[in-house]
Amino acid sequence: MTESESGRKKYSVAVAAGVTVFFLTTYLIPWLRENMLLPCVRGIRDFFVMLGRHLKSSATIPWWSLWILIALSATIVLRIINSIRRGKSMESRKLDWRMFREFIYGGIRWTWGYSFSGDIIQLAPLCPVCSYQFDLRHDAVPDDRLLYGLRDVTRFWCDNCKEEKAVLDGDYKRVELRVKKEIHRLYNSGEWETIVRRQIAERSENQSAER
Ligand SMILES: [Zn+2]
């Protein structure tokens, strides 16, 4: 390539660029502005103007439908206020001792109900992990301190976890008696209230976690 050839090439590139810029600024950009940008802007502006007019205008609806709307909103507001008040009163409310129906003792979750006269009935030992009712087995373990060298124990087997979860001293009758005595101790000391409040809090925590 000679000097003059490369000079001619540079010249023609510059001319082409100049023509392109001229074309863009003179025709294409004004055309785009006129046919694309302005209609868009006008469309958006018209939409907001219409919305403003619509909101300012008054609707004519029959009074009965207006009353239904007012009643509905009032019910919703009252419900919200009520649920807030109920949540507060749960904390300060006096608890009924019959709400005390379960606790953990000896590594076992004990549940029970109450007879009409308030006696503990249907005391059941449950697995603290899976809540399956334990299978019980009366057994004896060596104990040198005793005359016969053996001590009665009750084994608590969870057939769901496939695991022995607890071994408590005595046959099941004695275990049951001990548990009932412990429940009575909690009534008398007032500790049952703390336990029930904690259980209620845990339950509502679990419920909100599930939601
Ligand atoms: Zn279990």
Image (spheres, rainbow, N blue to C red):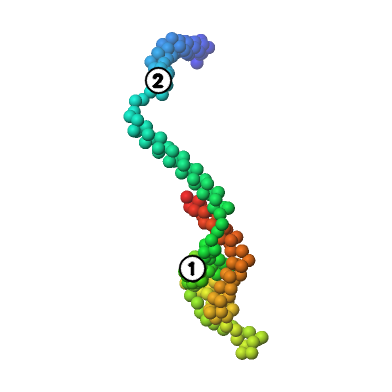
Residue found at the far right of this picture: 145
Residue at 41% in and 17% down: 42
Q: Is mark 1 within 8 Å of ligand 1?
A: no
**Position in image of residue 201 (x %, y %):** 55, 55
Picture quadrant of residue 169: bottom right
Within-10-Å neighbours for mark 1: few <14, some 14–19, many 20+ = some
Residue at 56% in and 73% down: 180
Q: Are marks 2 and 1 in contact (CB under 8 Å)?
A: no
Between 72 and 156, the residue placed more toward the observer is 72
Whether residue 19 is visible, yes or no, is no
Q: How many marks?
A: 2
User: Is residue 13 shown left or right of residue 188?
Assistant: left
Residue at 58% in and 73% down: 181
For discs 2 and 1, the disc positioned in front in the rendered view: 1
Residue 184 shows which numbered tag?
A: none
**Position in image of residue 36 (x %, y %):** 39, 18
**Position in image of residue 64 (x %, y %):** 34, 33
Residue occupied by mark 1: 113
Between 194 and 146, the residue placed more toward the observer is 194
User: Is residue 91 shown left or right of residue 78?
Assistant: right
Picture quadrant of residue 148: bottom right
Residue at 62% in and 88% down: 149
**Position in image of residue 50 (x %, y %):** 39, 20
Marks 2/1: CA–CA distance: 67 Å
Placement of 71 over or under 203, stated as above or below: above
- Look at label 1 and name its amino acid: Gly
Whether residue 113 is visible, yes or no, is yes
Q: Earlier in the sequence, mark 2 or mark 1?
A: 2
Q: Name the secondary structure under disc 2.
A: helix
Placement of 194 over or under 170, stated as above or below: above
Residue occupied by mark 2: 53
